[in-house]
Image: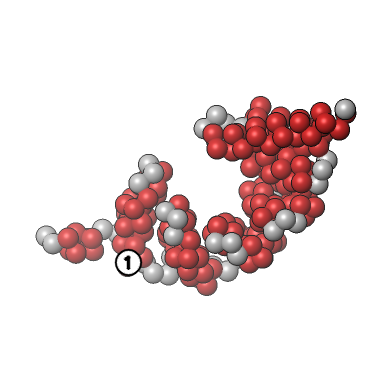
Amino acid sequence: MSDEDFKNDKTALFWLKRGNDSFIAGNFEDALYSYDNALELDPENSKIWDNRGVVLADLGWHSEAIESFEIALELEPDNSRTWSNMGVSMGASSRFEEAINCFDRALELNPEDDEAWGNRGTAYFSMAQYDEALKSFDNSLKINPNNPGALAGRGSALRFLRRYEEASDALEKFMKKAPKDLLHMREEAWAILLEIRLIMGREKE
């Protein structure tokens, strides 16, 4: 049996599950290979296109990821997860206004999505619109008080708004609650926290 015969002998569901297993294992290139094979057999499956986009984004190929998400949304326009995923890739491509539009659409469909709120806040933060960023981070934390990205983002937004005591409280809460494997985020939060303490110390002099 040739490689092509072997691929066609499997079902789209087989390749989808294989892709999901590879993705969970962190083998993104194999996951992409599996999703591509699934789509050869079932090209109208929006879930596969969405999963494929997530893998492409994790590989850093955001333009290709956006194309995959767009196809997924043509097939299933009201999928909040796909809108949110596309927003992340838009943000990673510095297309922040388009990212916010994607998150707004995702939140219209699922207003309780704390990750979409947090990512929306990050997009506004990247545009230096700190008041709007803070609103989104606060909405995220109303839904999930332990969302680490929203906690860190809230502290950073408050720092730029010069609300130093609140920023310090938010970042300290992040340091207590954030998983240990979020090393980069923890280091960045700690650096901002030290800066805030220095500023507050000077203001008291």
Neighbourhood count class around disc 1 (C-alpha, 10 Å): few under 14, some 14–19, many 20 upward: some
Q: Examine the image and state in which quarter residue 197 appears.
A: top right
Q: Residue at x 67, y 40 (%)?
A: 152
Query: Which secondary structure lies at badge 1?
Result: helix
Q: Is residue 55 visible?
A: no
For residue 108, side relative to residue 77 (left or right): right
**Which residue matches tag 1?**
41
Q: Position of residue 138 (x, y in %)?
A: 76, 45
- Residue 158 placement, left or right of 26: right
Q: Is residue 82 above or below residue 183?
A: below
- Left or right of residue 204: residue 56: left
Q: Position of residue 82 (x, y in %)?
A: 55, 60
| Camera-side residue of 88 and 38 | 88
**The N terminus - image quarter:** bottom left
Image coloring type: secondary structure
Q: Amino acid at mark 1?
A: Leu
Q: Residue at x 44, y 60 (%)?
A: 61
Residue at 17% in and 63% down: 5
Q: Is residue 157 visible?
A: yes
Is 58 rendered above or below residue 3?
above
Residue 154 vs 131, above or below: the answer is above
Q: Quadrant of residue 99?
A: bottom right
**Vertical placement of residue 63 versus 194, above or below:** below
> Which quadrant of the figure contains the C terminus?
top right
Residue drawn at x 83%, y 31% as measured from the top left: 202
Residue 83 position in % (x across, y down): 59, 62
Residue found at the far right of this picture? 204
